[in-house]
Image: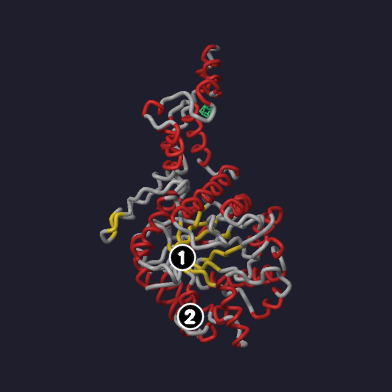
Amino acid sequence: MTQIRRARDGEVTPAMKRVAEREQVDPEFVRQQVAEGQAVIPANVKHGSLDPMIIGREFGTKVNANIGNSETTSDIEGELRKLHTAVHHGADTVMDLSTGGDLDSIREANIARSPVPVGTVPIYEAVKQVDDVTDITHEILLDIIEKQAEQGVDYMTIHAGVLMEHLPLTDGRKTGIVSRGGSILAQWMEENGMQNPLYAKFEEICEIFAEYDVTFSLGDGLRPGCIADASDEAQFAELDTLGELTRTAWEHDVQVMVEGPGHVPMDEVADNVERQQEVCDGAPFYVLGPLVTDIAPGYDHITSAIGATEAARAGAAMLCYVTPKEHLGLPEEQDVRDGLAAYRIAAHSADVANGREGARDWDDALSEARYEFDWSEQFELALDPERAREFHDQTLPGDNYKEARFCSMCGVEFCSMRIDQDARDADGEMESIEDDTDVADSPAAEVNRPPVGRHDASDIADEIEGVDLSHEYPSADD
Ligand code: SF4
């Protein structure tokens, strides 16, 4: 039985209790949010290594990292390293977007070892099973979805909202259809002259999802691929269909979140979130970025983190990270790290601005460590402790500098914090800066966005099939 069915029956499940503990909220509040479809706990009954988490606008903003291989790179060891990197750097969920190699073995290995929910896009596997996209049948799709559900996938992107009648609406776009799933289905519909098979078979998919408690991530196959195409008729026509499908899934006791754009100018981001919340009756919104400008290939973790912050401010529940390699190539380890850092900053900034309980304690604790020149504590509390320590030690590596009342940025003579402290000390004011925020006593210590190193990755072994995963992470200069 699914989490939403049990919640509707009034049961507080063990997963809900665990989520409440992580979020520092009342378990009954979690139950109510899940029962009303306002939050999801993606937790396939077959995913034994999962530490349950929740996605919803009333909870901490979550971050997803995409992992997976392409045709040219495919081995289980490499994929497990990516999973390890993503969880180590704070991903709340991962999506395995593999399109090459032994897809089943890679997926099963990831699920067996992942403490975070694993998502997939089943249409990718369907494409690999046929010579031509148009050869995909309803049966092939349903078989793949059922197999992946049986393997323990926690949520699946299902592009069921792209309909035949929506396709002409994309004709005037600058960049057409940019979603991989959306473009595959558009080609299938145009060449077969039939309605989207995922839409046609949606109720059967609901039945499979209900059996394993797989959560829908309703894909936005017509998301805009540039800011010129944002908020157009095609995007909102699909969104209306996603609202209809959300209600159908709920009727089948299946959990739902809804995916969103893509590329949106900053002044339209909040409107997009509010519109999705209204059309989809508050189902959690899971956004890709959005990128707020198209001009910065190589820096799209930044262009998109700006949009992601704005989206989370307005109520988006989960942010799908974008790496610096977006539009340019398959991300590598350093790109995963940079993308996750950008998105965890976006999520945390929005949580602070939205007044999320305990979120700001982390900032305050780090600021105190900084002002006290407690460098070790500052590194420990940093979002990426390894990066912070490495940058500091590039110029002041000695242990004696870990208590120094300056760093190389302003130098010993011009260290403003040292000068300020000395002045306040002389005035006898130093006591006024004492503040005992202790992050260990704060709700922030227990929620899903602790500093890297405090993130609970304990279920990921450092040794996997003889592979040492406790590697050094490369520096930005490597
Ligand atoms: S030298 Fe400048 S940057 Fe470094 S600790 Fe002092 S005030 Fe901060």
Location of residue 160 in the rendering, given as x and y in whole percent from the top left corner: 57, 75
Instruction: Look at the numbered discs 2 and 1 and tell me whether their residues touch, using CB distance below 8 Å.
Output: no
Point out the residue furthest to the left here.
466
Whether label 2 lies within 8 Å of ligand 1 gets the answer no
Look at 56% across and 77% down and name the residue there.
184
Picture layout, residue 355 above or below residue 278? above
The kind of residue on which mark 2 rests is: Leu
Under tag 1, what secondary structure? strand
Under tag 2, what secondary structure? helix
Q: Name the residue under label 1.
A: 119
- Res. 443 visible in picture: no
The image shows a total of numbered marks equal to 2
Picture layout, residue 407 above or below residue 88? above
The kind of residue on which mark 1 rests is: Gly
Q: Which mark is residue 357?
A: none
On screen, residue 217 versus residue 18, left or right, reads right
Question: Splitting the image into 4 quarters, where does residue 45 fall?
Answer: bottom left
Q: Residue 141 carries which label?
A: 2
Point out the residue furthest to the right here.
172
Location of residue 371 in the rendering, given as x and y in whole percent from the top left corner: 50, 27
Look at 37% across and 62% down and name the residue there.
78
Whether label 1 lies within 8 Å of ligand 1 gets the answer no
**Quarter of the image containing the N terminus?**
bottom left
